Image: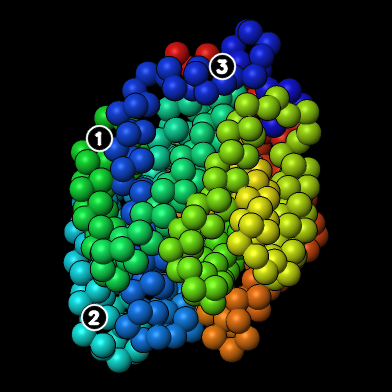
């Protein structure tokens, strides 16, 4: 990416206003927002329901982890199918299966089914999670091509994601604690079904699909074969560890102080920090390259996560959660931005789903480990999980950062990483 991003001939950073004036984008943005909202509710709703029925954070975290692992394994396959057959062909059956699977899991949990039965029900629940976020990003990439608006689009998507993570956990917690322990999962299933079908109906904006043509046919292999995607996946595993560790440990903390309703507020502060940072990242004309920003941002995230275990008050934990959220957005946005120059268009949806799946896998591992630690040693021990996850990912990122340099596959490359000649969007 350029030392300074320009738009058209204005010499200024392309902003959100210009991005949102791109023809046709609102036809997929609004349905996409509705369709991705339930994803922010799923894990916390499972944790709250299973913890209510079993009395164990470890068991609740394990069921949520099975869901996350299942999603991580199946999400890239969903991306491959979307690249091959189109997003609608994947979404329609996917949301139907997901709604049915969530209903089954909810009924089994309320019936006090054995833990292994809940594990079995969690597999299709996770496998069928609709990958709306990656699909929206793929639509942006198809619409904008090599435009300098792509980093702004990546920032906008991060802000949208994090807004859902402000609203989702708060809504799920309010439903589970104020209405019924199963209300969060029920709302998740209904919103997934309605939003997913509405998004799938937007055929005109879905990216081209089918077999790659020309030189891309011989090179069309899994997006994970791109070294830079593997490095980014490790970084996103660490980010997933933050999400999962925060969800379980904040729930355990609010239970310890006798204020379970504070869980949604605290997690909302964490997500709000992420959202605010995302807005800023998209508005700044960066003079440093994306690899440098990714490493620096990740180092800040690791440093902030290292303090969570020592917080013993609602105010301090809320403030630290806000700081951690502020540090996540730069890493997420830069990682997603790097996908566009690293991966051919024929495998881009798959690449985005690998990163989303990595977050889910890291979250799954984190909720399992943090749940066990919280049961045995209290919430402070659970907060060690984000620290360990981000520290390991940071070491990998620093050691392998050279692999984030994109290879040239028939695109114009000037100085810097992914520095392309600006084009007019409209």
Where does residue 151 sit, x and y in percent of width and height?
59, 32
Disc nearest the viewer among 2 and 1:
2
- In the depicted structure, whether residue 44 falls above or below residue 51: above
SS under mark 3: loop
SS under mark 1: loop
Residue at 37% in and 26% down: 25
Q: Earlier in the sequence, mark 3 or mark 2?
A: 2
Q: Which residue is mark 2?
A: 110
- Which image quarter: residue 180? bottom left
Q: CA distance from mark 3 to mark 1?
A: 26 Å
Q: Quadrant of the C terminus?
A: top left
Residue situated furthest front in the rendering: 258
Q: Quadrant of the N terminus?
A: top right
For label 2, count other residues whose C-alpha is less than 10 Å away and answer few (under 14), some (14-19) or many (20+). some
Kindly identify which numbered label has been placed on residue 34.
Answer: none
Q: Which residue is mark 1?
A: 202
Q: Earlier in the sequence, mark 2 or mark 1?
A: 2
Seen from the viewer's position, the closer of residues 182 and 3 is 182
- In the depicted structure, whether residue 45 falls above or below residue 13: below
Q: How many marks?
A: 3
Along the horizontal axis of the image, is 162 left or right of 5?
Answer: left
Where does residue 181 sit, x and y in percent of width and height?
29, 71
Where does residue 342 sit, x and y in percent of width and height?
61, 43
Q: Earlier in the sequence, mark 3 or mark 1?
A: 1
Q: Which residue is mark 3?
A: 423
- In the depicted structure, whether residue 297 falls above or below residue 259: above
């Amino acid at each position: 990416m350029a030392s300074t991003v320009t738009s058209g001939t204005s010499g200024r950073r392309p902003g959100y206003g210009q991005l949102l004036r791109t023809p046709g984008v609102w036809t997929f943005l609004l349905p996409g927002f509705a369709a991705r909202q339930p994803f922010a509710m799923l894990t916390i709703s499972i944790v709250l329901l299973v913890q209510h029925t079993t009395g164990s954070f470890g068991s609740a975290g394990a069921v949520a982890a099975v869901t996350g692992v299942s999603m991580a394994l199946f999400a890239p396959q969903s991306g491959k199918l979307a690249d091959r057959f189109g997003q609608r062909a994947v979404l329609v059956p996917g949301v139907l299966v997901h709604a049915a699977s969530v209903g089954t899991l909810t009924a089994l949990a309320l019936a006090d089914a054995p833990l292994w039965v809940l594990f079995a029900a969690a597999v299709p629940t996770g496998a069928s999670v609709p990958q709306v976020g990656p699909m929206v990003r793929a639509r942006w990439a198809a619409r904008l091509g090599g435009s300098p608006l792509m980093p702004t689009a990546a920032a906008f998507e991060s802000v949208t994601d994090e807004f859902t993570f402000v609203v989702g956990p708060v809504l799920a917690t309010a439903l589970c604690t104020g209405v019924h322990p199963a209300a969060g999962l029920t709302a998740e299933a209904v919103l997934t079904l309605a939003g997913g079908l509405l998004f799938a109906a937007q055929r005109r904006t879905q990216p081209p699909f089918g077999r790659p043509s020309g030189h891309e046919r011989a090179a069309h292999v899994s997006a994970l074969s791109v070294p830079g995607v593997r490095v980014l996946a490790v970084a996103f595993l660490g980010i997933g560890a933050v999400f999962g560790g925060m969800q379980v440990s904040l729930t355990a903390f609010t239970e310890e102080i006798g204020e379970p309703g504070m869980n949604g507020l605290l997690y909302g502060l964490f997500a709000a920090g992420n959202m605010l940072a995302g807005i800023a990242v998209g508005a700044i004309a960066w003079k440093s390259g994306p690899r440098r920003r990714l490493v620096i941002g990740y180092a800040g995230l690791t440093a902030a996560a290292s303090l969570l275990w020592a917080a013993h008050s609602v105010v301090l934990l809320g403030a630290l959660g806000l700081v951690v959220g502020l540090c996540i957005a730069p890493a997420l946005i830069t990682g997603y931005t790097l996908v566009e120059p690293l991966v051919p268009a024929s495998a881009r949806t798959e690449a985005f789903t690998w990163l989303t799946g990595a977050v889910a896998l890291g979250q799954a591992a984190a909720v399992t480990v943090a749940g066990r630690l919280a049961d045995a040693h209290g919430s402070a021990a659970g907060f060690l999980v984000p620290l360990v996850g981000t520290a390991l990912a940071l070491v990998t990122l620093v050691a392998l950062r050279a692999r984030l340099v994109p290879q040239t596959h028939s695109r114009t490359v000037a100085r810097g990483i992914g520095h392309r000649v600006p084009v007019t969007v409209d």
